[in-house]
Amino acid sequence: MTEPMAAVIKPLERLVVIGLGLIGGSFAKGMREAGLFREVVGVDLDAESCRLAVELGVVDRCESDLAAACVGASVIQLAVPILAMEKLLVSLGRLPLGETVLTDVGSAKGNILRAARRELAQQLPRFVPGHPIAGSEQSGVEAAKGNLFRRHKVILTPHETCEPAAVELVDQLWRALGADVEHMQVEHHDEVLAATSHLPHLLAFGLVDSLAKRSENLEIFRYAAGGFRDFTRIAGSDPLMWHDIFLANREAVLHILDDFRDDLDALRNAVDTQDGHHLLGVFTRARVAREHFSKILARRAYVDAMHNTDLIYLAMPGGKVSGRIRVPGDKSISHRSIMLGSLAEGTTEVEGFLEGEDALATLQAFRDMGVVIEGPHHGRVTIHGVGLHGLQPPPGPLYLGNSGTSMRLLSGLLAAQPFDTTLTGDASLSKRPMNRVAKPLREMGAVIETGPEGRPPLQIKGGQRLTGMDYEMPMASAQVKSCLLLAGLYAAGQTSVTEPAPTRDHTERMLQGFGYPVTVDGNVATVESGHKLSACHIEVPADISSAAFFLVAASIAEGSELVLEHVGINPTRTGVIDILKLMGADIALENQREVGGEPVADLRVRSAKLKGIDIPEDLVPLAIDEFPVLFVAAACAEGRTVLRGAEELRVKESDRIQVMADGLQALGVKAEPTPDGIIIDGGPMGGGEVISHGDHRIAMSFSVASLRASAPIRIHDCANVATSFPNFLGLAAQVGIRVAEEGK
Ligand code: S3P
């Protein structure tokens, strides 16, 4: 980082750092090491700090006269304690500083900027307030480190009259020290810091003092374990500095402290009244939030977002598959288990829940709406249902990641709630069509706004009275059907949905499993409002959509035999088995049984010579998610495979017709996309680069293709495999598919 920056910044004359504590000293030392200034001069009231600063190589020299140090300097860094800042600004305001750029490191910005506005008339446009977030319990110039700010955040809070060149210069100086620089409004900065830094320090100081003064001697601390040590670590920080910070950021701290006091009172009350539900709610939500923070704190999420890392799978050619595996739980059923469990009365236990990002997005959405959900832990989830009318307004927009199922099903449910909601998602979800649910919901009386062209975000207005209706779906979509049935639980009278072809019926089955009456008459499903859901036990079968990758893998790789255990074989989902069998696959259903209203079986698959077929159109909705991998089967088959009537594939997580055609062509397969399908001629397959466009099923399909490729396949943009199949690479390796993250 240092080198390119050094090239951008012309060598500057003099840096003056006023205040040689840990932060000022580290800035000076880092700058000196980076060689961006001809000299680095320190100023500090404490003669010993000055002496040490020179001795430790923190600065080139120290100057005791402020004017002599500052006049003619290129940059002045103000690193004195925050309450001393005002006095310093008064002195600096009197000096002829000309083009000198000023910046500071104070941890509250509002009061410093107010003082600067008063005192720095001429210099104000060249004053760029800043705040490095790199505290430590150490203090003093002797603790200064040139790399203290490396990979730490530095927040700059430029004001409206700041000169852009001055902002740019300060920005680059911090970047030269390896910091991640962000810009923020002053007020926002102070609120954020009050919440994330100042309040925790206040609590840590307060708790240690409170305990220390209550116990006769400090005896009790002998019994303190790791939890106490971790929680109170920051009570070892510099008392004077923190005293200053609380006085400087008074308003923002009071605000967050008052909010926290209310929450603390509620916790006290819960303990007092033995309200375990409240406690569990707070603790489970906090734990999830904490896991989320940890990722950010570990900088993974942050760095990923910054650099948009491309997760590449490298799949080596050849091999065969064998063994017995159980793929993760069904995604559709996992989503619905959370939704219906939350709306039920009583406690629902779920086993085999899919711990993939999509189902977790649904889980988090319900937590955000006040439902207490324990787990998931090894596929077990306990949902403390709140009843059909017990959801609470979420604190902000519900972020649903990559999950179309979450957004479409939730929209039906939320259209009938008394509160407003906003549903958002990632880049892929933000491109997917939502009018298919918004339009019929509006006909029922819902008030929903979409983004341009009917895309997310969805703004759903609460407090509407919905009326049931008979709806003829223009496309075969289980998501649309489910969305309307969920709205129908609240709509006056009956809601019927007619589907043009059978689609997955988990919503209907599971509603019945929760004791809610649903009538299914041919292709029409009907619910009426006024009933309730009662908690139940759900065993989620393994997802046939995930099993499909291995059904194709074992079919195409000569000498393979594999058993996939406990796979859901609901007849609205088994199109992939039917299509593969039509192509000549050897798949046997063993040990068929019914678990919690869903049929399951162990699937034994042996390799077979596949042949190309015309895929019967009535099987399309029954295999809708499995086409990417079926196209791989087609590429390995003898002869031509033709798919028609599958335009829905163009609006999945990616345009699966185009993306698969591009990928297959890149491997030398003849694949011709058509408006509603594809024509694939089986033949030899080479290696090469394919792009999954962030679509989990495309990434996994090309991993399977490697079994028949003649050279390695590099698959780009694979991070979203975690949305539906968290341990795909582990299971693939276990059975013999040689695919792994590149570089691991
Ligand atoms: C799903 C329905 C299907 C499917 C999706 C899950 C569901 O979507 O592709 O992965 O759980 O209801 P459509 O309803 O858009 O076909």
Image: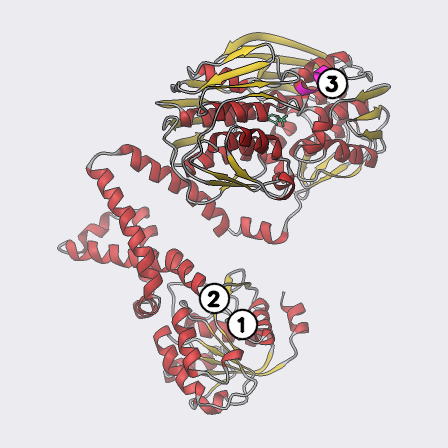
What amino acid does circle 1 point to? Gly
For image coordinates 32% across by 70% down, the residue present is: 244
Mark 2 crowdedness (10 Å alpha carbons): few <14, some 14-19, many ≥20: many
Task: For marks 2 and 3, give the CA distance.
Answer: 58 Å
Percent across and percent down for residue 716 are 71, 41
Mark 2 and mark 3 lie on one chain; the one further toward the N terminus is 2
Q: Is residue 14 above or below residue 317?
A: below
Main SS type for the magenta part? Answer: helix
Work out which quarter of the rendered image holds the N terminus and state it: bottom right
| Residue type at tag 2 | Pro
Kindly identify which residue carries mark 2.
Answer: 132
Comparing 700 with 125, the one in front is: 125
Q: Which residue is mark 3?
A: 555
Q: As rendered, which of 315 and 245 lies closer to the eye?
A: 245
Q: Residue at 23% x, 47% y: name it.
A: 223
Q: Quadrant of residue 732?
A: top right
Which residue is at the front of the view, 633 or 268?
A: 268
In the image, farthest residue toward the left? 216
Residue stretch in magenta? 617-621
Q: Quick check: can you spot residue 315?
A: yes
Q: What secondary structure is found at the residue carrying circle 3?
A: helix
Distance between the Cα atoms at labels 2 and 1? Answer: 13 Å
| Relative image position of residue 246 (x, y in whole percent) | 32, 66
| Mark found first going from the N terminus, 2 or 1 | 1
Q: Are marks 3 and 1 in contact (CB under 8 Å)?
A: no
**Is the C-beta of the residue carrying label 1 under 8 Å from the nearest atom of ligand 1?**
no
Image quarter of the C terminus: top right
User: In this image, 405 relative to 346: left or right?
Assistant: right
